[in-house]
Image (spheres, rainbow, N blue to C red):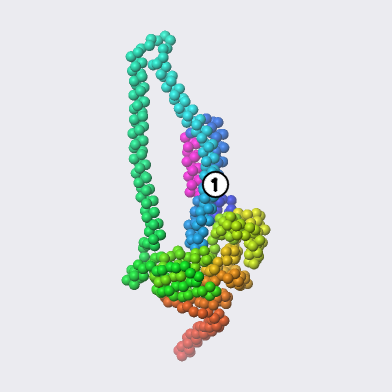
């Protein structure tokens, strides 16, 4: 409850998980070391540690932000993969990493001088001074004492042998520690080698995953062992392509349809029937187990999910994502086009916030669901792709704004592929792909007006049937 309150109801603590899991442990260790080192000089304790503590706190904050960036990648890995924006995310991670490293280096430089004084002067200088004092009677004539050659020789031999023994002991200890380190390195090497081998297998299209019981049948095993063809073209065509989930469940055994530029497609069906699976095949996330798929180049297909991914960066970065600022300046040079796009979506007022286009926020917490969907549509207007996959992407906007979104997208020459059950979207499509949830499908032209009339008639008949059931029950009562 406390963690939820910190995360959702209070903005003072950022990255509470970092504070709980890492910083508390470091605080405890630092406190224990402070207790064990109370004998250190007071000046060292109050001046050096006080000044360094500020840098350590900043290091913890930067490390927490860096870990948080990786958490975002885990949560939104599919959207990032469908956008093909791994380079943009890597650039963002690099910035966070080098900021952290730059700060760590600053800390190390300050620690160096203190370490030099503590380790060299205190440890080596005073030890060497003690040995020098002890060696005076053995190697030099002391007033009032007679020089004994044999005693001096024995002392010299003792010092030499002691030094050699210590060196030998140190070398033997290093060998023992090296053996331990080599053993640990062997374990790490095995894990890294396994990772690289699996990555090579995945690049070649070879996957190993525990499958559901349905996939144990002979027919499904035959489908899963096959591979289809994928080619790049101007249109989208599936020819006898099976739709298979990652756990081996065959959703559709043989899907065939053909979409040309300008053929706007509406996709409907119950949950788990293969709608999202179709998009993952188009995006190259899932393999093609059979048949033939022709699709446009990766950069010509744009995907907008129901809950769009908002990247880490400025307000401008949310619109041009996954383009970098350098790529944007090379294409446009000014922000007038972006402002025009926001004006179409009636959200140009967000630029008036503090910082303008350069404002930096955690945008998924700042923007509402409807505003996030408008931002995602603004990306579509900015990139002007040839094909757009719209997965329930207008569920949180008004019907008037939905109309503006679709009409503008079609005016840009973008062919739309929409997953939605909202009747208001039927009029923007001229083809329909309907899954029945039992492995079957239907594909053909869509007459929106006729379909609306049929749906209305079906609902009226269903209502009358429900009334008929009540009438029949009443007739039985009367007979009784």
Q: Is residue 320 left or right of residue 469?
A: right
What residue lies at 52% left-to-right and 71% top-to-bottom? Answer: 417
**Height in image: 185 above or below 363?**
above
Look at the magenta stretch and give its main secondary structure. Answer: helix
Q: Quadrant of the C terminus?
A: bottom left
* Quadrant in the picture for residue 253: bottom left
- Residue 251 visible to the viewer: no
- Residue 410 visible to the viewer: yes
What residue lies at 54% left-to-right and 46% top-to-bottom? Answer: 99
Q: Is residue 53 left or right of residue 129?
A: right
**Height in image: 14 above or below 443?**
above
* Quadrant in the picture for residue 153: top left
Q: Which residue is mark 1?
A: 99
Question: Magenta span covers which residues?
Answer: 18-36
Horizontal and vertical percent position of residue 318: 58, 59
Horizontal and vertical percent position of residue 359: 62, 55
Q: Secondary structure at mark 1?
A: helix
- Is 45 a magenta residue? no
* Quadrant in the picture for residue 203: bottom left
Disc 1 crowd rating (10 Å Cα; few below 14, some 14-19, many 20+) is some
What residue lies at 50% left-to-right and 57% top-to-bottom? Answer: 86
């Amino acid at each position: 409850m406390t963690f939820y309150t910190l995360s959702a109801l209070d903005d003072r603590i950022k990255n509470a998980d970092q504070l709980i899991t890492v910083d508390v442990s470091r605080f405890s260790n630092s406190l224990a070391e402070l207790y064990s080192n109370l004998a250190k000089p007071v000046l060292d304790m109050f001046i050096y540690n006080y000044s360094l503590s500020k840098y350590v706190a900043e290091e913890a904050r930067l490390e927490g932000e860096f870990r948080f960036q990786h958490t975002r990648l885990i949560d939104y890995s599919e959207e990032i993969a469908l956008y093909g924006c791994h380079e943009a995310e890597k650039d963002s991670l690099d910035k966070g990493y080098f900021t952290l490293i730059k700060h760590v280096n600053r800390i190390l430089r300050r620690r160096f001088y203190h370490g030099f004084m503590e380790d060299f002067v205190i440890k080596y200088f005073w030890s060497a001074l003690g040995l020098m004092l002890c060696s005076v009677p053995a190697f030099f004539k002391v007033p009032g004492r007679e020089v004994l050659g044999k005693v001096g020789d024995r002392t010299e031999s003792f010092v030499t042998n002691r030094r050699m023994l210590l060196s030998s002991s140190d070398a033997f200890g290093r060998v023992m520690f090296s053996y331990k380190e080599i053993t640990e390195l062997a374990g790490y090497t095995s894990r890294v080698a396994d990772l690289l081998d699996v990555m090579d297998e995945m690049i070649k299209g070879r996957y190993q995953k525990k499958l559901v019981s349905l996939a144990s049948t002979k027919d499904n095993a035959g489908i899963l062992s096959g591979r289809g063809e994928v080619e790049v073209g101007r249109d989208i065509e599936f020819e006898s392509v099976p739709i298979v989930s990652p756990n081996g469940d065959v959703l559709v055994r043989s899907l065939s349809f053909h979409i040309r530029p300008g053929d706007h497609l509406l996709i409907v069906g119950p949950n788990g029937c293969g709608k999202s699976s179709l998009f993952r095949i188009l995006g190259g996330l899932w393999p093609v187990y059979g048949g033939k798929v022709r699709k446009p180049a990766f950069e010509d297909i744009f995907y907008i999910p129901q809950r769009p991914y908002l990247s880490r960066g400025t307000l401008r970065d949310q619109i041009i994502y996954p383009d970098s600022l350098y790529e944007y300046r090379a294409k446009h040079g000014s922000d007038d086009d972006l402002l025009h796009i926001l004006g179409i979506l009636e959200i140009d007022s967000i630029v008036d916030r503090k910082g303008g286009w350069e404002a930096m926020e955690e945008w998924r917490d700042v923007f509402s669901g409807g505003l996030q969907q408008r931002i995602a549509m603004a990306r579509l207007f900015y990139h002007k792709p040839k094909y757009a996959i719209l997965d329930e992407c207008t569920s949180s906007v008004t019907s008037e704004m939905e109309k503006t979104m679709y009409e503008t997208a079609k005016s840009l020459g973008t062919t739309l592929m929409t997953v939605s059950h909202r009747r208001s979207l039927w009029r923007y499509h001229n083809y329909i792909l309907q899954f029945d949830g039992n492995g079957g499908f239907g594909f053909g032209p869509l007459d929106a007006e006729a379909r609306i009339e049929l749906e209305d008639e079906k609902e009226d008949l269903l209502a009358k049937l429900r009334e008929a059931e009540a009438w029949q029950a009443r007739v039985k009562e009367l007979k009784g």
